[in-house]
Amino acid sequence: MQYRKFGKHEIEVSVLGYGCMRFPTIDGDYNVINEEEAMKLLRHAIDNGVNYVDTAYGYHGGNSEYFVGKALQDGYREKVYIATKLPMWHVKEEADFDRLIHEQLEKLQTDHIDMYLLHALNADHWNTVKRCNILNKMIEAKKEGKIKYIGFSFHDELHVFKEIIDSFDWDFCQIQYNFLDEYYQAGKEGLDYAAAKDIAVVIMEPLKGGEITINPPKEVMELYQQADVQRLPADWGLRWILNNPKVTMLLSGMGTMEQVQQNIETVSTSLADSMTPAELELIKKVQDTYQTLALIGCTDCKYCMPCEFGVDIPGNFALYNQFIKDKQSIEYKKSYLSFIENKEDAGSCVECGKCEEACPQRLNIRELLKTVHKTLA
């Protein structure tokens, strides 16, 4: 495992952090973590050098923090930095901060949270931060020893990101960044902007919710096969991010032991500025190829779920993307029939719009679901 300095601070974090949003589940129920399997994965990662564990109040239906608290018993708490997040959508007044952080400390079975983030800041949530005096509450919690480092995760436009960065002495920030989202939201310019201020930059969605790794288009695989060194798609994606010396670390939501082991092996040799010009040019060609496909930019974060009308929103989007990537193979239209039979299909959307309010990608979900149904039904 390699480690990098955490911004302006002297501590070092593993370049691979464990994202606790995609643990294995039981019977496909996102809210029910398979704790026996998840325990093996998380502890194996820690035993092999991962020292940063990132969870949040709402992950796995509110159960991720509970599980992480259990998994970090038996001496594992002392081996890692815990990162979790203040759920900004639950903050209506100043007193909510104290209530929520107290609940999170109890769930995590710890007396302090190492890295505490304001979750999914956008223009609206940033206004809530200012209205409810949240930054002063964060400073107060830091003085009391409840948290050690103050940061935020972000989903909005670049100008909003810069305003937030300039408004406080942040220890770190967390942005979405991968070779498909190089210029999306905060993007590369935001990364550079934060790093120039010596703010640690943590990367989320390095593989875009698996989009970069799950059945890549034939044209992309043909490009990869031209490389002098043969690598898995996930290897290319993670290596491209860590090639940037301004990146502090990346988070990976690893749901299988194979993913844990492969990612640990990949990052052990993913040094800054280690990719050759030919490899970087290859990734540029891969980027250009993906851009011609017009895929739906869903990362399967499930913030939009559950839909009260039964629509499997991320499932519909994933099936549509596979249909597009696989040259419109008829098998995906056949698979869509099961969505219709279970009334989980895109055509069951009643356009209430609640999903769009929750979507960190700011997708026009209602219109996209119409496209899915028109294409696959």
Image: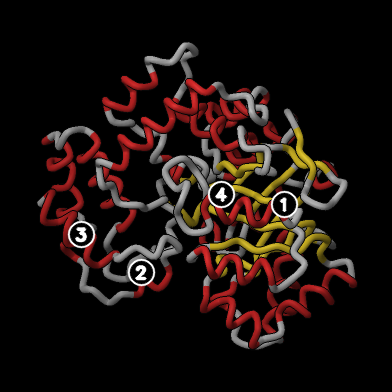
Per the model, the C-alpha gap separating discs 3 and 1 is 40 Å
Q: Which residue: 41% across, 65% down?
A: 359
Looking at the picture, how far across and down is residue 261, in whole percent?
60, 26
Tag 1 near tag 4, CB within 8 Å:
no
What label sits on residue 200 in the rendered view?
1
What label sits on residue 39 in the rendered view?
none
Observer-nearest of 228 and 307: 228
Per the model, the C-alpha gap separating discs 1 and 2 is 31 Å
Looking at the picture, how far across and down is residue 227, in whole percent?
43, 15
Which residue in the protein does label 4 denote? 204
Per the model, the C-alpha gap separating discs 4 and 3 is 27 Å
Q: Looking at the image, is mark 1 or mark 2 nearer the viewer?
A: 1
Q: Looking at the image, is mark 4 or mark 3 nearer the viewer?
A: 4
What label sits on residue 355 in the rendered view?
2
Amino acid tagged 4: Met
Q: Looking at the image, is mark 3 or mark 1 nearer the viewer?
A: 1
Looking at the picture, how far across and down is residue 264, in whole percent?
64, 28
Q: For the residue labelled by badge 4, is the local secondary structure a helix, a strand or a loop?
A: strand
- The image quadrant of residue 172 is bottom right
Q: Looking at the image, is mark 2 or mark 4 nearer the viewer?
A: 4
Amino acid tagged 1: Ala
Which residue in the protein does label 3 denote? 346
